[in-house]
Image (tube, rainbow, N blue to C red):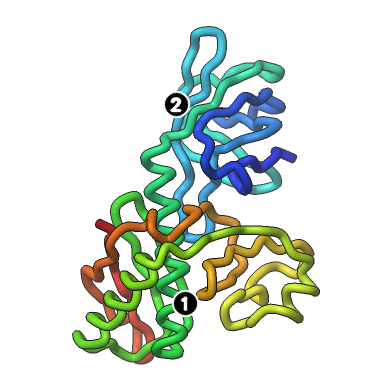
Amino acid sequence: MTEALYLDETGDAKFEATVERVAGDRVVLDRTLFYPEGGGQPSDTGVLEADGETWNVTAVRKKDTVYHTVDRTPPEKGTTVTGRIDWERRYAHMRYHTAQHLLSAVLLDEYDAQTTGNQLYADRARIDCAYERFSDEEFAHIESVMNDRIGEGLEVRWYEMERDEAESALDPERTRIHLLPDSIREVRIVEIEECDRTACAGTHVENTDEIGEFRITGRETKGSDEERLKFVLE
């Protein structure tokens, strides 16, 4: 099983690893900083380098382990490689993912609107929530609260908890642990100081002041009781 360096060493962009397996145009490494697509966050891209050769990593998926898709014949099993992730892309995902968590907390606190889905990109994001329809005044209020909390410079941290402990100690409306498969017995919690704690395996910035200015750019009605909010960070 690949060691998931991306869960803890989120500020690193370079690592060394050994190719454990080759499967077509994909390689399995013994350790990786490349984030695999999941939880609304796209996978990292970047390169693998070895012996003067370079392979572009175009996609990363996690199944039984983490698979890195490369753009040509992969390095052989046993090869020691240096991996470099596209840091600008990764950092954008970290900012947007943290903003999504903060927005989910604001929507729950201010409007009792639960998050039902989300999708992040490097230049924008969207969030689906259980709410009939927001007014322009409510949009302005959401933006104001979000930017106030961002400006407070709240600490963001992540840690592991036993599932039973997390289910008994944390607010289920915020953690949403019930959405995880029963087989997962240790839960990674992402906590924004005094605002939110939720189960998440994504990457995040360490302080809300890294997020930037929050601005809502549009909406879509997803049914009689669900809205999709689109936003950017500036």
Q: Quadrant of the N terminus?
A: top right
State left or right for residue 176 relative to residue 163.
left
In the rendering, which numbered label is found on residue 56?
2
Q: Nearer the viewer, mark 2 or mark 1?
A: 1
Residue drawn 52% across the image and 41% down it: 11
Residue at 67% across / 76% down in the picture? Answer: 178
37 up-or-down from 48: above or below:
below
Q: Is residue 179 shown above or below 161?
A: below
Which amino acid, by three-letter code, is at mark 1? Ala
Q: Quadrant of residue 182?
A: bottom right
Quadrant of the frame with the C terminus = bottom left
In the picture of the structure, the residue carrying the numbered disc 1 is 105
Q: Nearer the viewer, residue 79 or 213?
A: 213
* Image location of residue 118, percent across then percent down: 43, 67
In this rendering, is residue 222 above or below 56? below
Q: Residue 90 appears in which quarter of the rendering?
A: top left
Which residue lies at the image location 65% right of the left edge and 32% below the top edge?
A: 28
Horizontal relation, residue 190 to residue 221: left or right? right
Residue 99's quadrant in the figure?
bottom left
Q: How far across and how far down the image is residue 91, in percent?
A: 41, 45
Q: Residue at x 44, y 52 (%)?
A: 94
In the picture shown, does residue 8 fall above or below 67?
below
**Disc 1, SS:** helix
- Considering every residue shown, the one lying at the far top of the view is 52
Question: Which callout, 2 or 1, points at the residue further toward the start of the chain?
Answer: 2
- The residue closer to the viewer here, 98 or 219, is 98
Amino acid marked by disc 2: Asn
Disc 2 crowd rating (10 Å Cα; few below 14, some 14-19, many 20+) is some
